Amino acid sequence: MRILIVEDDQELSAQIAAMLREENYAVETAADGEDALEMGLEGAYNAVILDPGLPTMDGFSVLRRWREAGLEMPVIVLTGSRKDVSDMKEGVRAGATNYLTKPVDLELLLDWVRGVVNSAGPNTKKPVIERGELRIDSQSLKVWMAGAPVKLTPTEYRILHYLAINNAGPTSAEDLVRHNFEGDLVKTAQEVPVFISRLRGKLGKAAIETILGYGYRLTLGDD
């Protein structure tokens, strides 16, 4: 089960992520609206926890764009107060599934996540990412290369998946750490090259290009 947390309060995001991972959910996080929009469009999530007040693009705009694209995953909105009636109305119109107020009761949030995950299937729009001979199933978390299964560790999978959804340009090691690991599995950008090397060993040396001064780019699928 995959959950996306969209929250720019890093401490709160880390608390929610830790709680959900203890319950064996696969968790990804975003701290701004534009990243959240892209991740929602490219991934297959069983539920999303969304803060409306985000940098780059507000949460309700992100939610509207998801719904316009046909994405139906449940979205739990974290709002500042039940007195914010206008915000609640806007969220309902944008397609929110439910609201919880801050400060967040983590046990109640977990109950709501369990409820929406059990009552709705994952967003299955674009669950499979294909880059040339590479195939990534974002729902089953499985990877194939030229039709053969590739066994990846969770850290290798997260890095590869993020490179695949950001295939238009290079992704820095800092971005890979910030958007995927919350400091729990990969604490610093200096650790990323080790996992890039392991991925090249499994996918081919030319599969991931190093662009000096910018980061890494997945070359599979290039014309």
Image (spheres, rainbow, N blue to C red):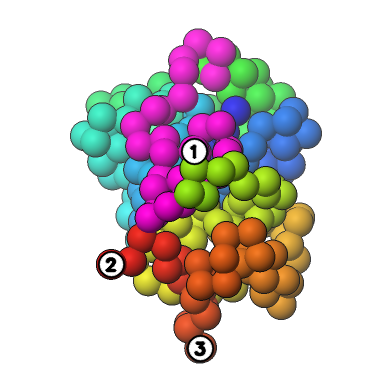
Q: Earlier in the sequence, mark 3 or mark 2?
A: 3
Front label number (3 vs 1): 1
From the top left corner, tell me how far across and down residue 186 is, in percent: 73, 62
- Judging by the rendered image, the residue that carries numbered circle 3 is 213
Residue 105 position, x and y percent, is: 67, 29
Q: Residue at x 66, y 65 (%)?
A: 201
Which residue does the image show at 59% across and 42% down from the upper left? 149
* Residue 94 visible within the image: no
Q: Position of residue 204 (x, y in %)?
A: 57, 65
Q: Which residue corresponds to mark 2? A: 223
Image side of residue 165 versus residue 177, left or right: left
Identified by mark 3, the residue type is: Gly
Identify the mark nearer the N-term, 1 or 2: 1
Which circle, 1 or 2, is nearer the viewer? 2
Residue 220 placement: quadrant: bottom left
**Visible in this render: residue 123?**
yes
The stretch drawn in magenta includes residue 132: yes
Q: Is residue 112 left or right of residue 121?
A: right
Q: Residue at x 74, y 28 (%)?
A: 23
Which kind of residue does numbered mark 2 sit on?
A: Asp
> From the image, which quarter does the C terminus lie in?
bottom left
Q: Which residue is mark 1?
A: 137
Cα distance in 3D space between marks 3 and 1? 31 Å
Q: Residues within 10 Å of mark 2 (few under 14, many from 20)?
A: few
Q: Secondary structure at mark 2?
A: loop
Mark 3 neighbour class, 10 Å CA radius: few under 14, some 14 to 19, many 20 or more: few
Q: Which residues are magenta?
A: 117-144
Q: Position of residue 62 (x, y in %)?
A: 32, 44
Q: Secondary structure at mark 1?
A: strand
Numbered circle sitting on residue 78? none
**Amino acid at the residue labelled 1:** Asp
